Amino acid sequence: MLKSSFCGAIAVLMALAGAARAQDPAEMVKKGAQAYRICAACHSLQPGVHLSGPSLADLWGKKAATIGDYGRYTEALKKADIVWDEDTLNAWLANPQAMVPGTTMVFRGVEDDQTRVNLIAFLRQALAPGGTAKVVKDGLIPERMAEGPSPQDLSSLGANQRIKKIRHCGDAYHVTTADGAEFPFWETNVRIKTDTSARGPQKGEPVLLRAGMAGDRVFIVFSSLAEIGSLVAEKC
Ligand code: HEC
């Protein structure tokens, strides 16, 4: 009897020690930084850098769907009456679809309670004034993760990628690059994109990106929608 209660006491002490370890704030932030990796696929911590999802800077205390000039919020999130704090973030990160049905945050949620607590502790620190620079300096996340996966800078590519002429003939786009080479691509293998940001192609000079090992699939990226009409000639 005595022995078992002694073991019980030891077990309780060990559990308490374990809980105390889990609550160590620096450790929580560190673990939260690991968990943040998954968010960095779609979000930046830098103000004004909107990727697939809105920048998370300035999140605390804000009403949902009001972060700066992100223009792709769903009606569902705009109508949800949510102010971001520990509790609302906890519910959101557990299951975004359950909290806001119809949200385009295509993310199935962080199931583990402690992982969410850690993640929120990390966001508290990273989004405090000067916090993003600090979490990078402390080595909690690499700088490119704080930035988020911005698209490739297309504004100064080499002559073999800058396009001088595009004509469409039959089932093909014939693309001439600034180094004088001309390539035909089957139209089904060509994906036309625009990048209107400052990192997009120069005006009047769309760029050619290879999109697969074989090199037969390509992206042609224009600096504006109008250029797609004005720079592609239907000509055989
Ligand atoms: C697949 C891309 C993707 C991933 C991964 C993702 N998000 Fe999102 N997130 C979005 C999109 C898109 C929205 C806007 C949703 C809407 O308008 O319904 C959003 C919205 C949010 C919002 C609300 C912002 C506001 O302005 O109200 C928060 C907070 C957020 N995400 C945090 C996170 C965190 C933390 C993670 C990691 C656990 C994460 N997201 C993972 C794409 C993503």
Image (tube, rainbow, N blue to C red):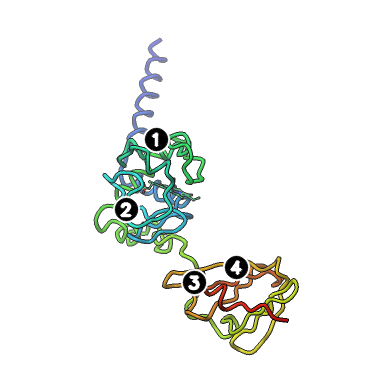
Q: Amino acid at mark 2?
A: Ala
Q: Earlier in the sequence, mark 3 or mark 4?
A: 4
Where is mark 3, residue-wise?
224
Q: Are marks 3 and 1 in contact (CB under 8 Å)?
A: no
Q: Amino acid at mark 1?
A: Ala
Q: Residue at x 58, y 84 (%)?
A: 164
Q: CA distance from mark 4 to mark 1?
A: 39 Å
The mark closer to the camera, 2 or 1, is 1
Where is mark 2, residue-wise?
126
- Quarter of the image that includes the C terminus: bottom right
- Dot 1: within a 10 Å radius of its alpha carbon, few (fewer than 14), some, or many (20 or more) residues? some
In the image, farthest residue toward the right: 170
67 vs 129, nearest the viewer: 67
- On residue 192, which mark appears? 4
Residue 93, position as x, y percentages in the image? 42, 40
Q: CA distance from mark 2 to mark 4?
A: 37 Å
The mark closer to the camera, 2 or 4, is 4
Residue 56, position as x, y percentages in the image? 36, 52
In the image, farthest residue toward the left: 129
Q: Amino acid at mark 4?
A: Ile
Q: Are marks 3 and 4 in contact (CB under 8 Å)?
A: no
Q: Residue at x 32, y 49 (%)?
A: 66
- Quarter of the image that includes the N terminus: top left
Where is mark 1, residue-wise?
91
- Dot 4: within a 10 Å radius of its alpha carbon, few (fewer than 14), some, or many (20 or more) residues? few
- Dot 2: within a 10 Å radius of its alpha carbon, few (fewer than 14), some, or many (20 or more) residues? many
- Residue 230 location, quadrant: bottom right
Q: CA distance from mark 2 to mark 1?
A: 20 Å
Q: Residue at x 67, y 77 (%)?
A: 234
The mark closer to the camera, 4 or 1, is 4
Residue 199, position as x, y percentages in the image? 44, 72
Residue 178, position as x, y percentages in the image? 59, 87
